[in-house]
Amino acid sequence: MADLTERIVSFCALLREAFGFRIGYPEACDALRAIEHVGVRDPERVRTALRAICCGRHEEIEPFDRAFTAFFLEVERGIPQPSLAQPEESPVDDARESQKSLKHSYPAEDEAPNAQTWEAMRAKYSALEARAEAPEIPGDGLPAMLELVNRMVTRVRLGRSRRWRAQPRGSRFDLRHTLRASLHSGGDPVTLRFLGHPLRNPRFVVLIDGSRSMTAHGAHVLQFAYALVRRSRRASVFVFSTRLRDVTRALRTLPRTGGARLTDLGEAWGGGTRIGANLTAFVRSYGRLLSTDTVTIVASDGLDVGEIADLERAMREIDRRSSKVLWYNPSAARRGYLPTARGMAAALPYVAVLAANLNEVAAAAG
Amino acid sequence: MIADGLYERFAQHGYIGSDEFVVSLDLMLALEKPLLIEGPAGVGKTESAKVLADVLGTRLIRLQCYEGLDAASALYEWNYPKQLLRIRLTENDGSTTREREAQIFGEEFLLKRPLLEAITQERPPVLLIDEIDRADEAFEAFLLELLGEFQVTIPELGTIRARHRPAVIVTSNRSRDLSDALRRRCLYLWIGYPSRERELAILHAHLPDINVRLAEQIASFMTFLREQPFQKVPGVAESLDWALALTRLHRDALDERAIDETIGCVLKVQEDWELFQTVRVGYRG
């Protein structure tokens, strides 16, 4: 039994450290109780039980299954697992280390998971995944950009939400707070309290085209995204080139002075442009971010080499599900520009405003 | 072990669950933790809680979430009119303010909403917190104490602990992301679209007198439809509706005409109809 305990604890540690799962001591305890309950005879049943405990979201199921197979099933057959080499080379050390790290059961957010370094290694040696590094987010001009974003965020008006909040000039009488307040006046309701609907908070989604044709404007757009993430907690930023990547968390953890850069963007920066495929991937995996409170901003020159029908379908879906879609196209600033690029023409019917600079974006958001 | 019998007991009530479903439910009952079920619309997330209540032979307490749902309508509320009346009635009976306050903030004056009701039952019920993604993010915080400790703290009254832990099922359609705090307190289960075999079993369980060939054709056709890039991919609820419609129309095979007449049971967006007309030629049943 002691051996099993050790295996489970090191499996949890592996999930946490190599795959970035947010699990710790309580999950390890639950996992042991679960195994006690379902038994160890049927590996698939063990897998399902541990999956229910260790996974918290749909995206985690696939990496979990991979890790489970590698950790529990393949080792017994003696097949080395290159991607998981580290934990399996020295299971004893690993268990010890995991017990140590179990003490602070939740890893801090800025701890880089090993999975990222592994991806970086692969990218380094693979010709297929050649990419460019993202530009530095310039520190100068940042105050002006924050000011611009501030203007934009405060300008967006979405009307009122359905929930009730205490408001001095609300529309509904609030018996609860009136009664509370009446305790001061011996039970006589002297001051009346009201409830009203608060204003709805906007959510922002920024999709940045990081392909080669956009490199000249990359730093500027990233600075905008960085400023937006700093200003609003309800903003999400994605970059895409060949692939799509969520960079919201990475932007949030950058130093506040500017002058830092996003690393490990992989195929999401500096490659070819597949706008349609990436927007489709966005709708599929992150569609939950879109709501009637969402202002979606796409920054791209609309030069798509992929399937145009995909782009059109994705844009229709994004437009249908968000409050407003704005498209920032740096080329639109050129004199005599016409949106005739295939991608741009396909997207145009679903775009509320085609902006030539970020000031126009800020003005159009409201 | 319960798990072995659980599948059959669910099947008796017309719910055909996958292996993962059965193991997760079994674990949820064994570890006494809430179960968070995510998945596309119409795959039987809500139904699972209803059937679980039937299987366990207890009450189902349901909290439907919506935007603007607050503690007053989910946890508890004081019965203000009754409190006011009591204040007036006891005005001249010589009791002190402290006594009167203790009186009007007693359990007698508490209106129990679903969550509080669920933990004060004599027999542990099944608590279904449905479509939690529709409630605001702030509402999740109300749930944390209940889901983690099975208790509710009322400032005027103190902490009310569950006499018996209810079986809690939380469902989400992923229209927004849930907080990590909530996810950590729950076991997690993803219910996807069923395999062809399971869909067939579901059709037979719900419509015992359906034509065998028709059921097979529907199951195959639904598998085909789910591979297409529709805006609203049809779920199990749709295939059951469709099967019912076709049996009512006394069709015993799925031919072109039958499909044309009844496709509205399955595809509910106009663009999907258009797309369907172009992809249907590719179907080889």
Image (cartoon, coloured by chain):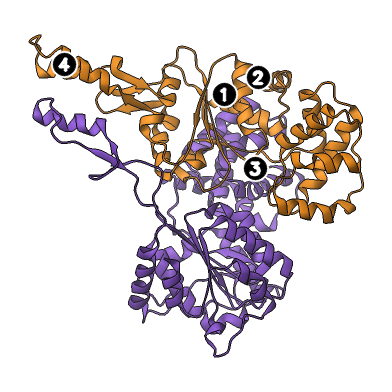
Chain colours: A purple, B orange
Q: Which residue in the structure is indicated by mark 1?
A: B30
Q: Measured from the top left, where is residue B97 in percent x and y?
A: 11, 19
Label ID, residue B88: 4
* Labels 2 and 3 share a subunit: yes
Q: Chain of mark 4?
A: B
Question: Residue most toward the top?
Answer: B93
For mark 3, what is the residue? Answer: B40
Residue at mark 4 to residue at mark 3: CA–CA distance:
54 Å
* Above or below B135: residue A228: below
Please name the amino acid that badge 2 sits on.
Ile
Q: At label 1, which amino acid type do we have?
A: Ala
Q: Image quadrant of residue A276?
A: bottom right
Q: Quadrant of the N terminus of chain A?
A: top right
Q: Is residue B218 above or below residue B206?
A: below
Name the front one of labels 3 and 1: 3
Residues tagged 4 and 1 counted as in contact (Cβ below 8 A): no
Q: Which mark is residue B2?
A: 2
Count of number-bearing discs: 4
Task: Please state which amino acid type lies under the numbered disc 3.
Answer: Pro
Q: Depth check: B106 or A81 in front?
A: B106
Looking at the image, is mark 3 or mark 1 earlier in the sequence?
A: 1
Marks 1 and 2 close (CB-CB < 8 Å): yes
> Is mark 2 in CB contact (under 8 Å) with mark 3?
no
Residue shown at the point (43%, 75%) measured from the top left: A260
Disc nearest the viewer among 2 and 4? 4
